[in-house]
């Protein structure tokens, strides 16, 4: 029993340390991004994003969308945003919705785009909700009430199928 407890404690310490290192790499990548050191940002964010970190996925989407440290690639931006959006990252949902509404990097799909914009409003924290609502409002003025209702009704089953 004592060996089991000791092994459990060692495993917990090792896993905790690994998690701390991963968070440190993520934070280093974010700091480098905001400092304009995109090579370092990419080096730190890429493995985290590939490992499933939604914040890193969002930042890679941003890098590809704006061509920061990488060649501008709307398809790659959409792919990274989608991975983060499916995990509930509201900024990624808004970005993906915008790309789908415009047909940048993905086929133009207003129903899905509208859905992602609605999702971003629902999931945004209070600081970001106003921005998400503004983006949704800019799209909504282009649509008739019947179109908005039809898109909202169509988006839910479509999203459920993608799960």
Image (cartoon, rainbow, N blue to C red):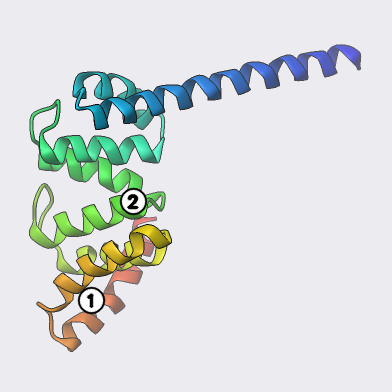
Q: Provide residue 102's location: percent of width, then percent of height.
A: 8, 59
Q: Give the numbered dot on residue 19.
A: none
| Alpha carbons under labels 2 and 1: distance apart | 19 Å
Residue 129, x across and y down, in percent: 35, 64
107 and 40: which is toward the camera? 40
Tell me if 26 is positioned left or right of 40 in this view: right
- Residue 55 appears left or right of 15: left
Q: State which tag comes first along the sequence, 2 or 1.
A: 2
Asked which quadrant contains residue 75, the reply is top left
Q: Residue at x 35, y 70 (%)?
A: 156
Q: Residue at x 34, y 66 (%)?
A: 121
**Residue at 28% of width from left, 69% of height from top?**
133
Residue at left offset 23%, top offset 40%: 61
Q: Which quarter of the rendering shows the N terminus?
A: top right
Name the one closer to the observer, 106 or 92.
Answer: 92
**Disc ID at residue 85:** 2
């Amino acid at each position: 029993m004592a060996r089991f407890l000791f092994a459990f404690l060692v495993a917990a310490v090792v896993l905790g340390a690994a998690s701390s290192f991963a968070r440190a790499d993520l934070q280093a990548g974010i700091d480098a991004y905001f400092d304009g050191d995109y090579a370092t940002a990419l080096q730190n964010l890429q493995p985290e994003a590939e490992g499933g970190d939604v914040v890193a996925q969002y930042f890679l989407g941003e890098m590809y969308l704006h061509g920061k440290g990488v060649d501008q690639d709307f398809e790659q931006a959409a792919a990274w945003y989608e991975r983060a959006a499916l995990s509930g990252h509201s900024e990624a949902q808004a970005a993906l919705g915008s790309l789908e509404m415009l047909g940048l990097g993905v086929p133009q799909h207003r129903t899905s785009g509208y859905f992602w914009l609605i999702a971003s409003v629902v999931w945004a924290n209070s600081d970001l909700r106003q921005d998400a609502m503004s983006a949704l409002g800019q799209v909504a003025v282009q649509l008739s009430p019947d179109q908005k209702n039809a898109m909202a009704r169509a988006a839910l089953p479509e999203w459920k199928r993608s799960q």
